[in-house]
Every structure is written in structure tokens, then in C-alpha cells.
Amino acid sequence: MERYIRKTTPNVPNARGYYGEFGGRFVPETIMPALDELTAAYDEALQDPAFHAELAHLQATYVGRPTPLTYAKRLTELLGGARIYLKREDLAHTGAHKINNALGQALLAKRMGKRRVIAETGAGQHGVASATAAALLGLDCHVYMGSVDMARQKPNVFRMRLMGAEVLPVESGSKTLKDAINEAMRDWVTNVRTTFYLLGSALGPHPYPMMVRDFQSVIGMEARQQILAATGQLPDVCVACVGGGSNAIGLFHAFRDDESVELVGVEAGGYGINTDKHAARFANPDVSRVGILHGTRSFVMQDEDGQVRETHSISAGLDYPSVGPEHAYLRSLERAHYTFATDEETMRAFQTLSQYEGIIPALESAHAIAEVIKRAPTMPKDSVLLVNLSGRGDKDLDTVIGLLGSA
Ligand SMILES: *Cc1c(COP(=O)(O)O)cnc(C)c1O
């Protein structure tokens, strides 16, 4: 049981869903009762061994957990520093970590008697994970997706439809993830009695950031055991890419109390953080500061008037103007550090991992690999670097072919 949902650090978040000054619930009054209902149902599920048992059973027999830990021998030799280990979330069913959370929330929806789930998606990965979990459990699934993202991620749109989900194009704003979230929230306000909002990252109003973290904490719990078994020591550094922040917080959570372990999140540096084409929420105070977006208080990329800025990343999954409140909190405590990788560095890392390890990473995950490429050579040879490979790159081949020319 313990293996699949980790609960540690008492009072984080506090009862009102705050991580220090971050988090909380900034939603229309009509949603408040739904959030209370959800919080109560989640608390109750956590007390019920049958809920843990069902999730554990599906994680093992359906998702394919535990995912392996791979020693990246040739990449380690190439870089000549720290020993590099990859946590292989790319090998989870549907090809990324998102299924961990989607399955947890879909089980909760079923338990609450809600037959309809709605979701929003950027890269399409969360939509696919939600459609998958809904098909498995026999729930109706409606997925909001920006039309720009739909064009970027056609195979994922097709996958969702194949599994019986309805994909609803969003034409407002920049037609990407943040607009899809707005639409999903609007739907939830209207249909709150019958509908469960299956939220895709460690974002949104309380209890979502906590619940998503808990469902993703399996990543770090497994990795911690696996790296101890493989090396006899804790990692010196854990690295993960940060979009909304769910794969990173899922990895970091298990190491949060291990003070010797440095936690490093990697944001999307796009064309560079001094251009207006990136999504590095922590990197440049001129374009990003504390604000409220989609129900939570965190860092938000905004202009002088507080209007949300358009963001850019080579990877749809990191292309979001805010970041999970727990990351803002860990950063304020200096417990975790945040850096960024540009599109160009990411493309190089994408190719390097493919060539040296025979693993084609998701472009999101390639941001974390880019940081590994910078950092590993500066670390002693007996040190250990653990990186979360959040997903596989099949979904990104069109983008990459466009940039590199046909293979
Ligand atoms: C969605 C996605 C991400 C970014 O989301 P987080 O919530 O920050 O983890 C990263 N990697 C992959 C493969 C994704 O699909």
C-alpha cells in the first residue's frame, strides 16, 4: 500500500491547501462545494485499504509498475562524471508518467459515483492517459484540447478517440493548454454534480496539487529503493523536467527529507529566457512573478498589467505559463533549485540519449537530459545522478523530423 501513495511532511499543504504563501483555492463560489466534496472523498479513500489495493493491483498488472531504473553506462562514459541513472516512466503504459495520476483520479471518480470525467490536455499525453483510465473503468470521457495543440499532436487525438473519448477543440486565446483548462473549469461549474474533473498536473485549486503529487509519488518511492539497491547510496542529485510539475514532484517527494539529495527542476527555456519565447516561470523576474492562475497561487508569466503571457516551448507538455505551487514553495525554501534548457539544448540532448542509450526520450524529458549533460561532467565519478525520464519520444517524431529534416 505504502508503495503507491506516499504521505509525509505533515502540514504540507496545510488544511486550506497552502504551501507557505502558495497554493490555495481561487475559484468561483460554485466550485467550492465540489472541491470540499472531492477533498473529503479523497481523504476517505486514503483510509480505505480496498482503494489502495485496487490502485496497487492496476499499477502492477495494467500500468506495468514498478518501472525499471536503467544505468546509462555509455552516457556516463561520454560525460565522464557522475554515474547517471534513468527512472523509466517512458515504459509505463501509454508512454509517460501521466497514467499514474489519471488512474488514481479515475478510481476516485468511480468511487464517488461520477460517471463522467472531463480533462484538459496540452501535449495530448494527459488526454490519452485520461481516456485510457476511463476506458479501463467504463467512464465517459470528454477531453478539452487547444486546436493548436491538436494540430501538433494528431496521433494523440486519434488515440483518445479510438479509446472512446470525445475530444473537444478549444479555439479561444492561444488555443493551447491554458485555454483548454479554462474550458474544462467552465464545464465543471456547469456539470459539477455528475462530473469529475480529472486534472493533469500538480496544479489547480486544493486538493489537486496534493492529490496529483500523491498519485505520482510512486515514481520517487520506487526510484529511491531501486537506486539504493543498485548503488548502495542515495543519489547526489535528482533531476526532472517541470511543466505543471507532476513528474518532478512525484520524484522529489520521496527525497524531500533526505537533505543530502539536491533536487533540480528543469523548465522550458525555449529560444532563451531573454526572448519572449520560453516557459521558464522561475528564471526571469521581468516576465514572471507571483500571481493566480487556474485556481492556485504560484509563479505566473505575466506582463506589467498582470495579463498572462503567451509561452513557447519545443515540447507541448512544458508550454504552460504557471507552475505547481509546491515547486514555488520548495524553491522559496531553497530545498529545490530550478534551471532551464533551451529548445536547442533539448534537441541535442534528444539526439544524444537516442544515440548513446537507444532510448528516444519525450522532448519534455529531453530538457532534463540537457541538464544532465551540463551537470554530470562537473560531478565526481563516484557520485550518482538520478534523472526522471518522464516519457518516450514517439509522439514527438513529427516535430523532430520537421527540425532535423527527414531521417
Ligand atoms: C505532460 C508531460 C510532462 C510535463 O508535465 P509535468 O506535470 O510537469 O510532469 C513531462 N513529460 C512528459 C512526457 C509529459 O507527457
Image (cartoon, grey):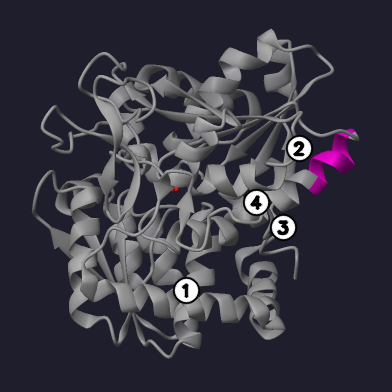
Residue 296 at x, y percent in the picture: 34, 52
Of label 3 and label 1, which has the lower sequence position?
1
- The residue at which mark 3 appears reads as 66
Which comes sooner in the sequence, label 2 or label 3?
3
* Snapshot quadrant of residue 316: top left
Q: Quadrant of the N terminus?
A: bottom right
Distance from disc 4 to disc 3, alpha carbons, whole Å, reads 8 Å
Q: Quadrant of the C terminus?
A: top left
Q: Nearer the viewer, residue 332 or 275?
A: 332
Task: Name the residue nearer the viewer: 378 or 403.
Answer: 378
**Does any atom of ligand 1 lie closer than 8 Å to the CB of label 2?**
no
Mark-to-mark CA distance, 1 and 4: 23 Å
Mark 4 — residue?
Answer: 219
Q: Is residue 281 above or below residue 119?
A: above
Is 308 one of the magenta-colored residues? no
Front disc: 2 or 3: 2
Q: Is mark 3 within 8 Å of ligand 1?
A: no
Q: Residue at x 91, y 35 (%)?
A: 232
CA neighbours of label 2 inside 10 A, class few (<14), some (14 to 19), many (20+): few
Between marks 2 and 4 in the image, the one whose residue lies nearer the viewer: 2
Query: Is there CB contact under 8 Å for labels 1 and 4?
Result: no
Q: Residue 226's x, y, as percent?
A: 80, 45
Relative to 191, residue 240 above or below: above
Amino acid beneath label 2: Asp
In the displayed image of the protein, which residue is found farthest to the bottom?
113
Q: Where's residue 305, x and y in %?
A: 10, 32
Lower sequence index among marks 2 and 4? 4
Residue 229 forms part of the magenta stretch = yes
- Magenta part of the protein: which range? 225-231
- Callout 3, which amino acid? Pro
Q: Are marks 2 and 3 in contact (CB under 8 Å)?
A: no
